[in-house]
């Protein structure tokens, strides 16, 4: 099996992000960002998706967390697209319903090569730790655009925004693990009748 791995080095006037993603990993992570809650969420993403993830990020957090969180989403989406390659043999679709205490997160996705995003989540606080709750939407939107996937996220029943946010990151990871799995019955076929994904 070819190594499904990608490295991304994204540098702007606002951020510098080096990111490495291995799809067929063991859930190992080495994440360093200036936004503590983002660091925690990316570690959860790696662990629950069984992806190996390394992130070294700096950003203009003296302004706010916007650019750092957005660019982390861009880098992670770009890395996923690169690591998937031509997508031969993948399951393609993934979904997961994940409970985290009183919150329940539902995620469905399609590694289709086309972007679509829906986010049905309401937060009650402006921030969780040092990360703006509005940036959770923006992170996953940026991720989906750059990974070129359909991504649908819904959170229900939650009273605690930490639980809502963490449940979302874990559920996306679990759904991606399902979608990126290589199906032995497909072999080197593409999971589409179009001939390309």
Image (cartoon, rainbow, N blue to C red):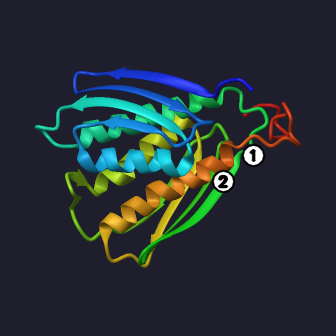
| Count of number-bearing discs | 2
Closer-to-camera residue (9/138):
9
Within 10 Å of disc 1 (Cα), the crowding (few <14, some 14-19, many 20+) is many
**Residue drawn at 63 percent across, 36 percent down:** 24
Where is residue 137 shown, x and y percent of the image? 38, 53
Q: Is residue 173 above or below residue 81?
A: below
Q: Is residue 70 left or right of residue 176?
A: left
Where's residue 134, x and y in %?
Answer: 29, 55
Q: Residue drawn 79% across and 36% down?
A: 89
Q: Which residue shows up at 46% across the image and 41% down it?
A: 143
Disc 2: CA contacts within 10 A as few (<14), some (14-19) or many (>=20):
many
Disc 2, SS: strand
Q: Which part of the image, by quadrant, shows the N terminus? A: top right
Quarter occupied by residue 108: bottom right
Q: CA distance from mark 2 to mark 1?
A: 8 Å
The quarter of the image holding the C terminus is: top right
According to the image, label 1 marks what residue?
A: 91
Q: Which of the numbered marks, if any, corresponds to residue 94? A: 2
Q: Is mark 2 in CB contact (under 8 Å) with mark 1?
A: yes
Q: Is residue 158 above or below residue 154?
A: below
Which numbered circle lies on residue 74?
none
In depth, the one of 1 and 102 nearer the eye is 1
Relative to 150, 103 lies left or right: left
Residue 81 relative to residue 169: left or right = right
Horizontal and vertical percent position of residue 162? 32, 64
Q: Report the residue at 19% width, 52% height from top.
A: 130
Q: Give the image location of residue 98, x and y in percent.
A: 53, 67
């Amino acid at each position: 099996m070819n190594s499904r791995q990608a490295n991304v080095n994204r540098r702007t006037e606002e951020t510098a992000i080096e990111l490495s993603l291995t799809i067929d990993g063991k859930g190992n992570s080495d994440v360093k960002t200036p936004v503590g809650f983002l660091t925690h969420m990316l570690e959860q993403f790696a662990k629950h998706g069984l992806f190996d993830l390394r992130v070294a990020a700096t950003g203009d957090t003296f302004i706010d967390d916007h650019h750092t969180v957005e660019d982390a989403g861009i880098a992670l989406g770009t890395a996923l697209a690169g690591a998937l390659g031509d997508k031969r043999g993948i399951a393609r679709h993934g979904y997961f319903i994940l409970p985290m205490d009183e919150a329940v997160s539902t995620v469905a996705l399609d590694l289709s090569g086309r972007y679509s995003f829906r986010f049905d989540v309401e937060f009650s606080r402006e921030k969780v730790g040092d990360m703006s709750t509005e940036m959770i939407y923006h992170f996953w939107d940026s991720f989906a655009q750059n990974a070129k996937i359909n991504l649908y996220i819904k959170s229900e029943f939650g009273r605690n925004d930490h639980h809502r946010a963490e449940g979302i990151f874990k559920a996306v990871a679990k759904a991606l693990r399902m979608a990126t799995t290589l199906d032995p019955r497909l072999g080197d076929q593409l999971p589409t009748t179009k001939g390309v994904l």
